[in-house]
C-alpha cells in the first residue's frame, strides 16, 4: 500500500506556485523569501528586477516536477519499508 506524501509538495506549491504561474514582478518574488531572507526583501527586489523571465519559469516548473516525483518515490519506498517491517514482526 503506497503512502502519499502530497503534503510536502502542497506546502511547497503554495509558495512556489507564483513562480511557475508567471509572476515575474520583483516585488512579488521577493515576498516569497523565508526566514532570515525576509529581512533582505528590499535587496531581493533590486536583485530580482528584470531577472526572472519565461525561461526561468519553465526551468523552475521542471525542477519542481522532478522534486514532486522524487517525493512520491520516497513516500512509496517508506510505505513499503513500513509494510515489510510490520510483516517481519509477526
Image: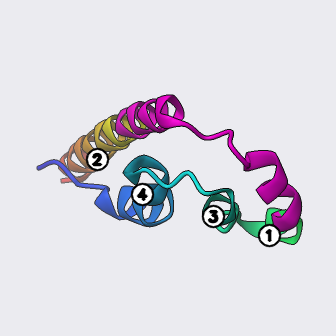
Q: In which image quadrant can residue 51 be found? A: top right
State the residue position of label 3.
32
Which of pointers 3 and 4 lies earlier in the amino acid sequence? Answer: 4
Residue 36 placement (x, y as % from top left): 84, 66
State the residue position of label 1.
38
Left or right, 89 with reference to 48? left
> Helix or strand or loop: what does disc 3 sit on?
loop
Which of pointers 2 and 3 lies earlier in the amino acid sequence? Answer: 3
Residue 82 painted magenta: no
Q: Does residue 35 sit above or below 45 in this rendering?
A: below
Which of pointers 1 and 3 lies earlier in the amino acid sequence? Answer: 3
> Helix or strand or loop: what does disc 2 sit on?
helix
Left or right, 38 with reference to 26? right
> Helix or strand or loop: what does disc 4 sit on?
helix
User: Is the Cβ of the residue at disc 2 closer than 8 Å to that at disc 3?
Assistant: no
User: Is the Cβ of the residue at disc 1 closer than 8 Å to that at disc 3?
Assistant: no
* Viewer-proximal residue among 74 and 53: 53
User: Is the Cβ of the residue at disc 1 closer than 8 Å to that at disc 2?
Assistant: no
Q: In which image quadrant can residue 84 be found? A: top left
Q: CA distance from mark 2 to mark 4?
A: 37 Å
- What residue is drawn where x is 31% and y is 36%? 69
Specify few, some or many for label 4: CA neighbours under 10 Å numbering under 14, 14-19, or 20 or more: some
Task: Please name the predominant secondary structure of the magenta segment in the image.
Answer: helix
Residue 30 placement (x, y as % from top left): 70, 61
State the residue position of label 2.
85
Specify few, some or many for label 1: CA neighbours under 10 Å numbering under 14, 14-19, or 20 or more: some
Specify few, some or many for label 3: CA neighbours under 10 Å numbering under 14, 14-19, or 20 or more: some
- What residue is drawn where x is 43% and y is 50%? 22
Residue 51 painted magenta: yes
Q: Nearer the viewer, mark 2 or mark 3?
A: 3
* Viewer-proximal residue among 86 and 29: 29
Amino acid at each position: 500500500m503506497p503512502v502519499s506524501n502530497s503534503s510536502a509538495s502542497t506546502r511547497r506549491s503554495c509558495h512556489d506556485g507564483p513562480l511557475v504561474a508567471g509572476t515575474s514582478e520583483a516585488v512579488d518574488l521577493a515576498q516569497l523569501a523565508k526566514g532570515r531572507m525576509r529581512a533582505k526583501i528590499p535587496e531581493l527586489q533590486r536583485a530580482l528586477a528584470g531577472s526572472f523571465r519565461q525561461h526561468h519559469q519553465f526551468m523552475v516548473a521542471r525542477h519542481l516536477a522532478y522534486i514532486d516525483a522524487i517525493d512520491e518515490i520516497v513516500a512509496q519506498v517508506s510505505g513499503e519499508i513500513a509494510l515489510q517491517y510490520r510483516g517481519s514482526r509477526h
